[in-house]
Amino acid sequence: MRLDVAPTTRKRVVLVICCLSLFMTWLDNAIVNVALPAIGTSLHASVAGLQWTVDAYLVALGSLLLAAGAVSDRIGRRRAFLIGLRLFLAASLACSLAPDLGLLIVFRALQAVGGSLLVPSTLGIITNTFLDPKERAKAIGVWSATFGVALASGPILGGLLVDAFGWRAVFLANIPVGAAAYLLARAHVPESRAEHPRRVDGAGQLLTVVTIAAATFGIIEGPSEGWTSPVTLGVFALAAVCLATFVVVEQRQPEPLLDLHFFSRASFSAAFVIATAIFFVFTGFLFVNTLLLQEVRGDSPLGAGLRTLPATAVIAGMALVGGHLVARRGPRLALVGGSACLLAACLGLAATHRDTGYLVFACCYAVLGFGTGLATPAITNTAVSGMPRAQAGVAAAAISVARQLGNLLGVAVLGSVLTTVFHGALPAALAHRSISLGAFSPALSPSTLAATGHAFDEASRVAWLVAAAVAAFSTAVAGLLITPHRRARAD
């Protein structure tokens, strides 16, 4: 039965199925951040280990999104969706049972493989279910808003689960949601395929995975291996060679993984850079702030989630405001204003220390959430503005990759800055201590607590300044490359 003649109720069921799956995919990363200190204590993980717990998911997701879209178009969106759900749920169960950090990281990567199939297949299912342009625009708007809802609920839900049941519960929470989506999809989602599906670019995909993984490894392991060690320099060199090879290979492919000609458009290049920068700042903020609230200030997981709410809750509401602003004034104001808000928030956080009153932090969090929510709807609009309709979907998928690239770089770079500066600021007698393994335990002597607290203040200040520099760059790119009053197609 084709869904173009299906009743409205059935279309809404399909939309609910797609949003449930997308919610689960986005929630997984937001919810895990709150559980990081508990994971570190339970599995004896260093800061680098905690970075990999987040970035293993992001590396795989960001690397595979474009290829997964081609696979979904070729084998069928319903089939890809169901395969992705089964893999995501199996990996979630495996994460909850992981006996050590190494296996947890492997299972997190497998989760992302499943998630990479879910994101493009759900958008394809919605596009082929809602054939009326107005209905489709509303459905995609609801689908897009799921991102903000997942971010807003992730810290609180994660805190509740960790406080009540332990960190393993954050992965088990995926199972009932995913199982419901799977059963509903089998009953209500029809199969659809692209008339002329793109071939999977195996060479481009392999080079993408190696480039991103090698660069991430170098950034995360640099503090422990040494920034000038043969291992660190070697993986950075590997990433550079693979990136250069990727550019050459993609220019010769008839159906490349990423059409590099997109970057000849100033609006697309600006959107790619801004998307990377915005999510670098926001995801890096979640990582550093989790350590600040739980490890340094002593909040419980739930308390940390509630305290982060001014940032995450504002995003969901501002995404709607940002969409209306783009429709009326074009994307430039939203992108410049959003990036500037992130810059102001990071500079404000750089002026704080571990004993600063919460009201100051809350104001910074709210400004950061305001900027992220304001800019997010304008990013995809800018990317697809002026693109032929046939290329708009691929351009939007490329911007999704930029978001994931920003996510993983935010955790990798700011986590490594935090580690490097923290250990450099410790007295020699304490330099062996890890930032996430009880360095702030009340059982320590007052002098040790003071020394570690001072070191964290120094480290977080530098991390916030690095984030501020990225936000400043995003503000400049938006101001210089986005045409004033340019109207773009709705997200």
Image (tube, rainbow, N blue to C red):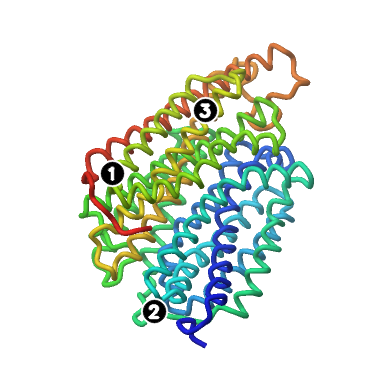
Q: Quadrant of residue 309?
A: top right
Q: Which badge, 1 or 2, is on the more N-terminal residue?
A: 2
For label 2, the residue is: 194
Residue ID at (67%, 31%): 294
Give, as a three-letter code, the residue at label 2.
Ala
Residue ID at (38%, 39%): 338
Q: Quadrant of residue 278?
A: top left
Residue 80 versus residue 235: which sits nearer the camera? 80
Label 2 secondary element: loop
Residue 129 versus residue 297: which sits nearer the camera? 129
Residue 441 versus residue 9: which sits nearer the camera? 9
Q: CA distance from mark 1 to mark 3?
A: 25 Å
Q: Is residue 294 left or right of residue 15?
A: right
For mark 3, does the 10 Å Cα neighbourhood hold few (<14), some (14 to 19), or many (20 or more) residues? some
Q: Is residue 413 visible?
A: yes
Q: Is residue 322 left or right of residue 421?
A: left
Verify CB contact (< 8 Å) between mark 3 and mark 2.
no
For label 3, the residue is: 363
